[in-house]
Image: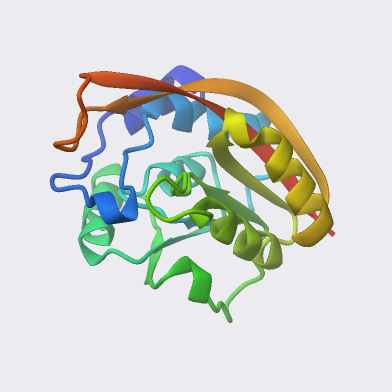
Amino acid sequence: MKLKQLEGLLGSLEQFSHPKIELEQYPTGHHIASRMLFSAENSFGDIGDKVVADFGCGCGTLGLAAALLGAEHVIGVDIDVESLAVASANAEDLEVDMEFVQCDVRNFGWRGQIIDTVVMNPPFGTRRKGADMDFLSVALKVASQAVYSLHKTSTRDYVKRTVLRDYNASSAEVICELRYDVPKLYKFHKKKEVDIAVDLWRFVPK
């Protein structure tokens, strides 16, 4: 599948109608999501014919991108039942299979197939400090092959130091720096849109 085709399909997905600020629910834009998964597959071969988990899947954008790129099986994990309902409807619309698990990622216990790759856009930790690192810690325990994750560029040194020292990672590489457009979703947002610099990381577990 071509990048433009993938981006177009992701752009048609339904997003949060009532996002929850306590969960830091922000949609992963189709521009970032398509490039994230396209790079994972075409540069590293981490998606096609693999078992892929989307942590904090929200409306399912990253997991559905994995399915469209030929993943063998995709599991979407999220604590929010309403988000999972939207993600399930999106999967039906795209006519792809995706399994959904409702739980807190920190308590994720999987006894199914070995998960090859985890993809995620975790909470940045603005509401609950360290939320993104909690996601990353679990992802590196679960994934057998690679973890792809978005983190604020301002945390780059901390993320790299922590995963290599404490989180069972053998390597941590920033694939590219992206502009994450945060739309005006909540009352406290003063601007129509805010750009945040984020890193797309590829982590390899030991």
Q: Is residue 204 visible?
A: no
Picture mark count: 0
Does residue 43 lie above or below 16 as drawn? above
* Residue at image coords 56%, 61%: 134
> Looking at the picture, how far across and down is residue 45, in whole percent?
71, 40
* Residue at image coords 26%, 47%: 90
Q: Quadrant of the C terminus?
A: bottom right
What sort of colour scheme is used for the picture?
Answer: rainbow
| The one of 64 and 176 positioned closer to us in this rendering | 176
> Looking at the picture, how far across and down is residue 24, in whole percent?
33, 48
In the picture, residue 154 is in which quadrant?
A: top right
Left or right of residue 167: residue 84: left
* Residue at image coords 34%, 30%: 9
* Residue at image coords 30%, 48%: 59
Does residue 11 lie above or below 159 as drawn? above
> Looking at the picture, how far across and down is residue 181, in whole percent?
36, 23
Q: Is residue 119 visible?
A: yes
In the picture, residue 27 is in which quadrant?
A: top left
| The one of 49 and 201 positioned closer to us in this rendering | 201
Left or right of residue 176: residue 2: left
> Looking at the picture, how far across and down is residue 44, in whole percent?
74, 36
Left or right of residue 201: residue 162: right
| The one of 7 and 79 positioned closer to us in this rendering | 79
| The one of 181 and 65 positioned closer to us in this rendering | 181
